[in-house]
Amino acid sequence: DHQMHERFIGPRFLIHVAALEMHPLDTENRIEELRNKQGIGYCNITKCCTKVCPESIEITDNGIIPLKERVVDDFYDPFGWIWRWLKKKSDR
């Protein structure tokens, strides 16, 4: 439990975003929105949502962790930084 409830969309909506983000025909990039607006960083991966899921779905392992990995790969990878910097420079 944390104090940033209004910035965190919760596991239900994170799984919805995961379904869209991981669909092979979907081409929209939601990574920046996940990081900045939807508060995926506020998920502490304690698997509380998995424990209370009435369908026993592994929400954390199969949906939220892969989304968090995509955010980390996109924003915190040094090659990603260089790529974004070069892309911004070429867009000018």
Image (tube, grey):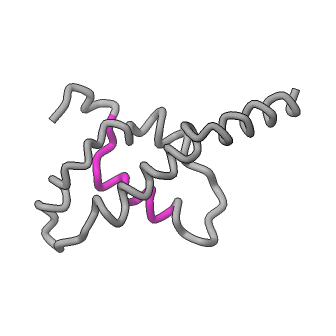
- In the figure, is residue 32 to the left or right of 90? left
User: Does the magenta segment cover residue 33?
Assistant: no
In-front residue for pair 53/71: 71
- In screen coordinates, is 75 left or right of 43? right
Predominant SS of the magenta segment: helix
Residue at 37% over, 61% down: 63
**Which quarter of the rendering shows the C terminus?**
top right
* Residue at 74% from the left image edge and 39% from the top image edge: 83
Taking depth in this image into account, of 37 and 1 the one nearest to the observer is 1
Judged left or right of residue 6, residue 36 is right
Residue 69: x and y in percent read: 46, 51
Compared to residue 61, the image places residue 91 above or below, namely: above
- Above or below residue 90? Residue 67 is below
- Seen in the image, is 69 located left or right of residue 78? left
Depth check: 62 or 33 in front?
Answer: 62
Task: Give the total of numbered labels.
Answer: 0
Q: Is residue 40 above or below residue 66?
A: above
For the N terminus, the image quarter is top left
- At horizontal 84% and vertical 28% (from top left) the residue drawn is 89
Image spot of residue 62 (x, y percent): 35, 66
Kindly indicate the quadrant of the structure image that contains residue 3.
top left
The magenta-colored residue range is 8-20
> Which residue, as the protein is rendered here, is positioned at the far front?
78
Q: Residue at x 36, y 55 (%)?
A: 64
The quarter of the picture where residue 28 lies is bottom right
Is residue 17 found inside the magenta-colored segment of the image? yes
Residue 55 in the image: state x and y as whole percent.
Answer: 17, 73
Vertical position of residue 19 compared to residue 44: above or below: below
